[in-house]
Amino acid sequence: MTKLYADAGTSWSKVLEIYRDKEELNSSPLVNIDNLESYLVYNNGKKYTDSQGNVYNGRTFLLPTEKFSSMDIMLDGATGHMVKQKIIPGGKYQNEIVSLAYGIRKKVKDLENATIIDIGSRDLKWVNFENGKYKDLDWNGNCGSVTGATVDMLCKYYNLDPHTLTPQKDKIAVTCGVFAMEKIMDSLISDSTPGVAIAQYIHGIAHNAWIFAKKPEKVYLSGGFCMNNCFIESLKFYCEVIPVGRFILIEGLY
């Protein structure tokens, strides 16, 4: 029987299904999901070892949370928003920042002095390691709020591809998505183009993340902004950046 783990985000949800052999997939809880293959991200033969030492194959899906929420499935383990009701009896719900810390320890075996930052649609969280041990952490759902969601909405409104934005040395100082809208509009009135204004806003998000995480020299970057080159290059104005993908929280679940 397959096992399912999920990181249910505000905009996007990540689902990992692990299994011993391909025949188990014929009775997978996901088998009746429409267009399932279109959400498949990884199916590359990676091996997954659970807490009991059992070794599995795995496949990973990235779904809009609206789609994930409507799916009639039950999970062996999960983290994220509004997902507790989908966990099987005896299954595990784990706090997101705990999943982040466990996940990066699996991903980076020689982790020494560094900070892992996870930033997505609505919040920002980080964990700091010193000499390979947990030292400090924090989680901000206010001034980190609506960051990714605001970028998505702005890019859709102005018909821009967020992956093609050019990093800007100037930044729009922001504390949340609501205030950012006003600052961006001010920038546009001052003859800035939408692409430049949004890139300046993204720089502002990167700067805030770095300040909030206590100005680390090295950052492992998790979450949706791993896919945004403008954000990565903006964060590099302040520190070394190593993107580690969107699935670190799931790595910390099994």
Image: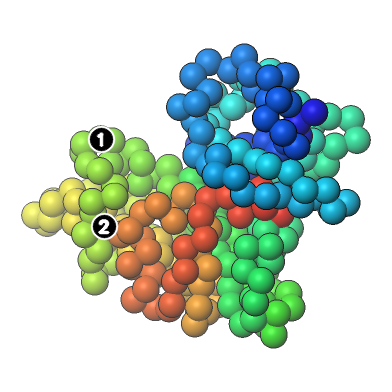
Q: Earlier in the sequence, mark 1 or mark 2?
A: 1
Residue closer to the observer: 10 or 134: 134
Q: Quadrant of residue 68?
A: top right
Number of numbered discs visible in the structure rendering: 2
Q: Is residue 6 visible?
A: no
Residue closer to the observer: 178 or 77: 77
Q: Is residue 58 visible?
A: yes
Label disc, if present, on residue 157 of the rendered structure: 1
Compared with 190, 14 (above or below) is above
Q: Are marks 1 and 2 in contact (CB under 8 Å)?
A: no
SS category of the residue bearing label 1: helix
Other residues around mark 2 within 10 Å, as few (<14) / some (14–19) / many (≥20): many
| Image-based side of 62 in relation to 161, left or right | right
Residue, x 34% and y 38% (percent of image)?
153
Q: x, y (%) of residue 79?
A: 70, 44
Name the amino acid, label 1. Answer: Tyr
Name the amino acid, label 2. Answer: Ala
Residue closer to the observer: 54 or 213: 54
Q: Quadrant of the N terminus?
A: top right
Q: x, y (%) of residue 75?
A: 75, 32
Q: What is the residue that sits farthest to the right in this orientation?
A: 90
Residue closer to the observer: 189 or 149: 149
Instruction: Determine which residue is flagged by label 2.
Output: 199
Label disc, if present, on residue 169 of the rendered structure: none
Q: What is the residue that sits farthest to the left in this orientation?
A: 191
Q: x, y (%) of residue 250?
A: 66, 48
Q: x, y (%) of residue 85?
A: 77, 28
Give the spatial CA distance, label 1 vs label 2. Answer: 15 Å
